[in-house]
Amino acid sequence: MKTLADRYNPQDVESKIYKWWEDAGYFKAQDQSTKPPFSIILPPPNVTGFLHLGHALDHTIQDLLIRWKRMSGYNAMWLPGTDHAGIATQTVVEKELKKKTITRHQLGREKFVDEIWNWKNEYGDRIYRQMRRLGDSCDWDRATFTLDDGVSSAVRKVFVTLHKKNSIYKGLRLVNWSGPLETAISDLEVEYQTVKGAMYHINYPVDGTNDFLTVATTRPETMLGDTALCVHPEDERYKHLIGKTVTVPLINRQITIIADTYVDMAFGSGVVKITPAHDFNDYKIGKTHQLEFINILTKKAELNENAGPYAGLKVSEARKKVVEDLKALNLLVKEEPHVHSVGHCSRSGAVVEPFLSEQWFMKMQDLALPAKRVVESGTIRFEPEVWTKTYLHWMNNIEDWCISRQLWWGHRIPAWNCGACHQNTVSETTPTTCEHCGSLELKQEEDVLDTWFSSALWAFSTMGWPSEETHSVETQKTFYPTHYLVTGHDIIFFWVARMIMMGLEFKKDVPFRTVYVHGLVRDSQGRKMSKSLGNSIDPIEMIDKYGADALRFSFLAHLFSGKDFKFSEQRVENYRNFMNKVWNASRFVLSHLESFQAPPEGLKAMPNKVHLSVFDQWILTKLAETEKEVHAALEGERFSDAATSLYQFIWNQFCDWYIEFTKPIMSSGPANEKYATQLVMAHVLNRITRLLHPFCPFITEEIYANLPLKNEACITDQYPTVENDHELLAFGSAQAALEIDIVKEVITAIRNIRGENRISPAVKLNIRLGVNQAEVQKILSHNRSAITNLARIDQMEIGEDGNLVKCAVTTVAIGEARVKVIIPLDGLVDFNEEIKRIEKTIEKLEKDVSLLSGKLSNEKFVANADADVVAADRVLLRQSQEQVVSLKEALVRFK
RNA sequence: AGGGAGUUAGCUCAGUUGGUAGAGCGCCACCCUUACAAGGUGGAUGUCGCAGGUUCGACCCCUGUACUCCCUACCA
């Protein structure tokens, strides 16, 4: 056996191990298998993106689930993929071209799209390489890109089918418009930000009078598109003006004063200007009152010819000029600072302008109905459950989805305009003639679909749908619906909801059973990570520095359901230390297994319980507890509980006690005892590596390779559970557990006295253990060497209390057992520290006594509380009182 | 504006049917004890946001209140 380095170096093992796994095909799932299926589809990251910490968290959870299920006998399939990310990718490439002072319009559509494909081919693998660094055990053969042929045909089929059902339609509507991107964006892509603006009060001259109507607005430039003023029909101030006209200043257009209950009489002046083509509320009023819709903007969000003298200006410039001109005309009543929220394009950051344009929409209400039902009925479960409400609330208020984008990168809409009859022919394949008039003059729609359109189909388009080839059918049969969708709450509406709707519509079944929603990764102060704040952290850098396992464990150990994740490098370092601890413990164990031959007959060779030391029996009991906890925690999606349970078992039980207890046996015990311990140690270390593997796959695989007891690979070995391990765990014993508890407590009590009195570890103590229970005496004498070794004791007497003069005394109580730890201090220390220690203990005990006696003298407590609660308190009270008495006696002996 | 979540040790957070508050990290002290100083041993630290109520008893249940965060919508 090779010797392991005394520090764990992730760089030495990670890439080597990953390659080995991948080459061996361990990540591959079978389309047909006798094993039960377990599947997860990765939320596809942007094809040209980088892995950020949010991905790292998201992937770590999925990989944990996949590896755990794979080891638990499932046909585990994790399907990776990347998204073409329409706007994001097109923007990136446009920016690159801009450096060469080329615009996409100069290149033309075809060449520009080629340029993006080049970009994709160059960077498309980067994120996959980064995922490998993290240890993602995806079935790479199934990797899918949203513009792959299969996905594209799914997109067309869905579009055509929904169009036939009239669920997709084209219409002239007011949409959110991003000027810089020159495209419509969906409601969800609008981010509202609070900005300091101004409220402008503008006078509109009432025709035929010298009166004015004052209107307040935050967007004065939109007055150029006003086609009405509106008041409340019951408003006594303005009732008489309804039906009359005013003149819009600056452009001198006459518009009518209309009435609508939409207007809030109490707000502002009670008069609202109506700009149907540039405001969503005004749009509705414009429709009801059949007003004229005047568009004053170009696609670049600059003022157009309808804005007269303001044509060509940017919105912000126009606003300035309009205000100046109004001032000059003395029509600006006042301008006051006003804080309000303004929609910004989540991609370009520009202010979103409501813009009238022809777009394609998907009707959502009918699709939402069944999608609501499956969540209400629990067929799909959100974890944590709070997201159910958010989801249902949105579904209840769902609006039609604008699915067309004026971009070049994406799935081009499968509709062809007829030059003759101007109707659309919608078809999965390129049509040759117009289905309405038979004309040959067909031209495909320029627009592409919103990226989320193809994402919505992801759960089945990645499995080959709608292809009817055997392979594709089998895949869907085995893996659809998937078991988990793991994602952040930021895309519940963008993606999760739409996947549910599409899954139900086209597969007649939900796309997944459980939506595990994790929080967003923030910095250690809880701020969003962003480039501008300079607080973003590159996960690859963390992996380089601390190893993938440490990064993964730091996520899993602190993942609290639904809460945002505050990332701290310090914590990664701490878990790097844990990895090192695991490494070194393994190193120690393996060094003592060099001469060990694993019995070919396996556990049957395990000596009978009587031959196992009490330490062995105890650690197996602890192992059983741990396996039980880990299983329950993983089943309950309490990943941090599982991680913590393992951490504590390994560090606080196995390393701190078991290894220390057994050192003497390993170095100089009798051969049969040593063999028994080796056998148990080998088994426990084997279980540790397997239990830990889904959390930190690299280090565990590396250790596993050096184990004397092993199968082909850790990644494919069985995940330990109490059930699977019952043969081994049967060697544990509750009696041993109790025994070790007593021994540990006695050792800790001695260490405490030593520490508090600052007695150097170099000084070996002489102690007495005062015990009058024969059973306990027996336990202590059996474990004499463990106590003397670990507490650094020279002479140890067990039996009577004896002379207590100038002795430190502490009573250890475990269940019924009582042990008085007595350490003569004369000559070792001045007694000040010990007196302080005793006084401190007395103080605490007296507090307990007064609390307990108060409780117990309360008749109502005794009458109402559970009998065992009362009894336990009585015992506690008696014990505390006894201890106070004996400590007070001890105090006297020091004076 | 409507909806949701939170407030427990210096920090990050547990606390599963109400019964004398926990973990990790950090901190302090002492130790290079032959797996590990990325380590060992010991220690300190909380009016459980605030105010009421229910109860023999409340971090836990109820009411109110303050603050923080998130989501949805957005007022001209």
Image (cartoon, rainbow, N blue to C red):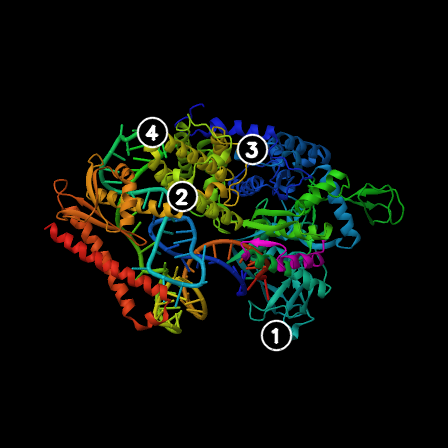
Q: Which residues are magenta?
A: A362-386
Chain letter for mark 2, please. A
B36 over A457 or under it: above or below: above
Q: CA distance from mark 4 to mark 3?
A: 42 Å
Q: Return the residue nearer the eye: A774 or A232.
A: A774
Tell me where residue A848 sits by quadrant.
Answer: bottom left
Residue found at the far left of this picture: A895
Left or right: residue A106 compared with residue A868: right
Determine contact: label 1, label 2, CB under 8 Å: no
Answer yes or no: do the residues labelled 1 and 4 have beta carbons within 8 Å?
no
Question: In the structure shown, which secondary structural element does the residue marked by tag 3 occupy?
Answer: helix
* Residue A369 within the segment the image draws in magenta: yes
Circle 2 is placed at which residue position? A648
What chain does badge 3 belong to? A
Distance from the alpha carbon under mark 1 to that under mark 4: 97 Å
Residue at 33%, 70% (x, y): give it.
Answer: A861
Badge 2 amino acid: Gln
Going from N to C along the chain, the mark reached first, 1 or 2, is 1
* Residue at which label 4 appears: A667
Count residues near mark 4 (Cα–Cα under 10 Å), then give few for <14, some for 14-19, many for 20+. Answer: few
Give the mark nearer the N terminus: 1 vs 4.
Answer: 1
Pair 4/2: label in front? 4
Classify B17 as above or below A420. below
Q: Secondary structure at mark 4?
A: helix
